[in-house]
Amino acid sequence: MISNSEIKLITSLQQKKYRALHESFVAEGEKLIRDLWLSGMIATHLFTTSEVSDTPIDPVVINERALHKISSLKNANGWLAVFRMPEPKPIPVSGLILALDGVRDPGNLGTILRLCDWYGVGHVVCSCDTVDLYNPKVVQASMGSIARVQLHYQDLPQLLADDHRPVFGAFLEGTPIQKTQLPSDAILVMGSEAHGLRSEVSQVIEQAITIARNSESSGAESLNVAMATGIILHEWFRG
Amino acid sequence: MISNSEIKLITSLQQKKYRALHESFVAEGEKLIRDLWLSGMIATHLFTTSEVSDTPIDPVVINERALHKISSLKNANGWLAVFRMPEPKPIPVSGLILALDGVRDPGNLGTILRLCDWYGVGHVVCSCDTVDLYNPKVVQASMGSIARVQLHYQDLPQLLADDHRPVFGAFLEGTPIQKTQLPSDAILVMGSEAHGLRSEVSQVIEQAITIARNSESSGAESLNVAMATGIILHEWFRG
């Protein structure tokens, strides 16, 4: 049985202000929930539509209708858990840091988190208008990578100005990445597809890099920000 | 004014069988429609919610409510056109051809078309169960690249066996792409994220390639098929 106060709590977590208030977020689906546990995240509530075992906390078994009520998915899939937001870790002073300027699309942020996880980039700094990490769509799209990649929401121009690492920015015009020295200690800044990098951010970029297109013909105007991030990270760690 | 028979025609084009019957498909939004015209595609109908000029065919001005009725988008955006499917061109005998095995997600196919357009890959061969090119979601996600990249739906194992080019396939285990000779004449086969490559397709792969992850830690299990395609195409044309 799920109580009315639990329904109210869980649906409120679809909004950022209540996630911040309760320092909690929702994840759905057995695979994702188990993945978050394996990565050390702590759940406070677990609801499932059938009896399950081997879970760190006992599930509350509810029917499909009740799950549908608390789910943010079009097709709820049997498991829903509330997790505590982990304690933030500080930004490391060495290594590659990714910075995102105004990435609003939750699917893009989720994909970028998977990429960072794949390439071992542990920290991402986001401008304050970047979509919230614990937005349900980001959580689902990240497929568990949110447990392994740390996001920091900060005043981006300030952070870039203060950090000692060289700052690289992706533009439509710049040095092709394969012709650029990509040092292991650096900050890579990616802008939103719609607006590119803001001028306050552009001003502190030390090296403009680009993904060269192959074709001379009038082709696609741009790649989306997640795709561009993937190609640049591949180049960074290519060896 | 839009007629009832036009409404019936246009909404029927959301289904593949009617697109095939009428050899027509729908595109929405001024930017996309103008892009398709610029690439030589021919529209038979144009509906807009305000008067417009500089269009190859005269628009029929309709109200928002009528547009909403014929649109497949949640937020219809002022322009909707019906285009004739272009005549298929033959698969060229040289160059890089991309082959897709069972890619079902329209967004992924649209993104892959943009990538091919960016890198100048003009032809993509798809297994017959790959999502239809003229599916409204593919058309919108491709952002005009459908006019410049030709898709062929064929018996994939047969085509791969018959073609003289070396066949490369992307797997989770294989030679890292940066350590592979990637010839300018080749076929690159990508599988669906959910199922990978089918065994009939795997059997004709001559070289298994992979995108190496950087991190030793337990990170993301895979990249999505569009991302993997982007990284591999970048490497192919890296020079």
Image (spheres, coloured by chain):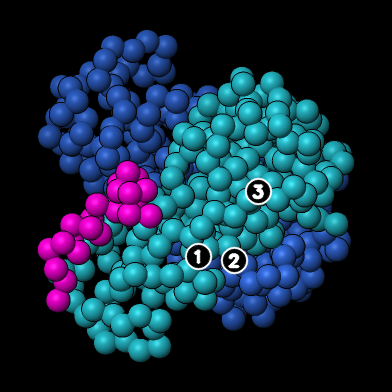
Chain colours: A blue, B cyan
B147 relative to B46 in the view: left or right = right
Q: Whole-percent x and y of residue B219?
A: 63, 33
Residue at the location (17% across, 22% down)? A63
Mark on residue A148? none
Q: Amino acid at mark 2?
A: Ala
| Closer to us: B13 or A99 | B13
Q: Whole-percent x and y of residue A218?
A: 64, 72
Question: How far separated are the C-alphas under marks 2 and 1?
Answer: 8 Å
Assign the magenta stretch its main secondary structure: helix
Q: Whole-percent x and y of residue A4?
A: 12, 34
**Res. A148 visible in picture:** no
Q: Amino acid at mark 3?
A: Ile
Determine crowd level at label 3: few under 14, some 14-19, many 20+ residues with C-alpha closer than 10 A. some
Disc 2 chain ID: A
A201 versus B219 height, above or below = below
Residue B64 part of the magenta segment: no
Label 1 element class: loop
Mark on residue B144? 1
Residue to which mark 3 is pinned: B91
What segment is highlighted magenta in the picture?
B1-23
Determine crowd level at label 2: few under 14, some 14-19, many 20+ residues with C-alpha closer than 10 A. many
Question: How far separated are the C-alphas under marks 2 and 3?
Answer: 21 Å
Mark on residue A220? 2
Disc 1 chain ID: B
